[in-house]
Amino acid sequence: MCTSITHQAKIYGRGKRGEEWIDLKECNVSYDHPYGMPLEHALNIDFVDESKGPAARVAVELSVDAARQLVKTIEAVLAQAEHQGVLEDKHQAAVG
Amino acid sequence: MYQTNQYEGMLAETVTLQGHKGETINAYMARPLGAGPFPGMVLIHHAPGWDEWYKECTRRFAHHGYVTISPNLYFRDGHGTAEDVGAKVRAAGGIPDEQVLGDLDGANKLLRSQPYLNGKVGVFGTCSGGRHGFLAACRSKGIDALVECWGGGVVMKQEELTPKKPVAPIDYTKDLSCPMIGLFGNDDKSPSPEQVNQHEAELKKCGKNYEFHRYDGAGHGFFYYDRPAYRQEQAADGWKKVLAFCEKHLK
């Protein structure tokens, strides 16, 4: 790819694709050409289940500002949940 | 140049070929009807994938008289929509240069085995396909002309090299075996104008037959009419230059 800036994380989650919820086992984050956003480069997040083939994908493409905002928002929500003692991390061991 | 009272016909279809290590991949092929002889053209799709733009581009070259083939370089990565497969390859950091060269060789061989070929084959690529085209024109045999459109990553820093891309293509410049035309947008970040200058300086140093065209008001991918990067004026001029170059060196 033109930037080849890409990272992958193993995750435990589910995502909605059309009417169907699918298991999501990997999260591919790249800064490269998007498909849907009218930008040359975007922060792309592909939530996928590699074992199910290329179509098992829930995609998000964000501007740089939006991506930074998302990171801050997620961190804030998790910090608040941790502060209130309601975080559930029981799946952490299962996914390594 | 096509005349309105001229008969025109085209055959366009999916074919298979033996690519890298003799592995079967599919490809899209379009050719003018008739006995020929016609020049050949290998189209190298861009990083986003083997998509509709490349299928249309294949037919465009056929309309201009070329037996044209666009191999699916992501064949081994599974099947689905071009976007889904492209996203998978993007996550994997692209595909190995050696594999691409093997697949392009296979496409070239398929063209050269056709009775209607005039014996000449060019390569055309945009984005990562421009980079792959330059690599192929330096390292493979049987390429008579190269069209490189905004090839990102021809110039690479040491820390950008990976097992899939072990050598910066610019380092092979001395081995470039055919004339080339390069089209670039001055607002592009990959390749940046500085990288385009480095690319040109190396070609000049090695005494290669090349022509570079740089466009103001255009960035990366200014031929893509389905993307906001499209620039009509620059694209129209660019196509004119590309087709004139191919006419000169391949017909």
Image: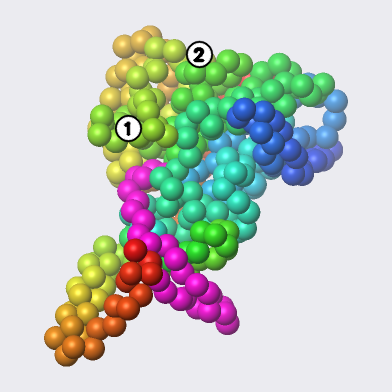
Q: Which amino acid type is shown beneath numbered disc 1?
A: Leu
The magenta-colored residue range is A1-26
Q: Chain of mark 1?
A: B
- On the image, the x and y values in percent for residue B184 come to 38, 36
- Please name the residue shown 79% across and 40% down the image: B10
Q: Residue furthest top?
A: B207
Q: Write down the quadrant of residue A79 in the picture.
A: bottom left
- Please name the residue shown 80% across and 41% down the image: B11
Q: Chain of mark 2?
A: B
Q: How many marks?
A: 2
Residue B214 visible, this angle: no
Q: Is the stretch drawn in magenta largely helix, strand or loop?
A: strand
Q: Residue furthest left?
A: A83
- Please name the residue shown 31% across and 11% down the image: B205
Which of the numbered marks, if any, corresponds to residue B177? 2
Residue indicated by mark 1:
B161
- On the image, the x and y values in percent for residue B61 come to 65, 36
Q: How is the image coloured?
A: rainbow
Residue A62 visible, this angle: yes
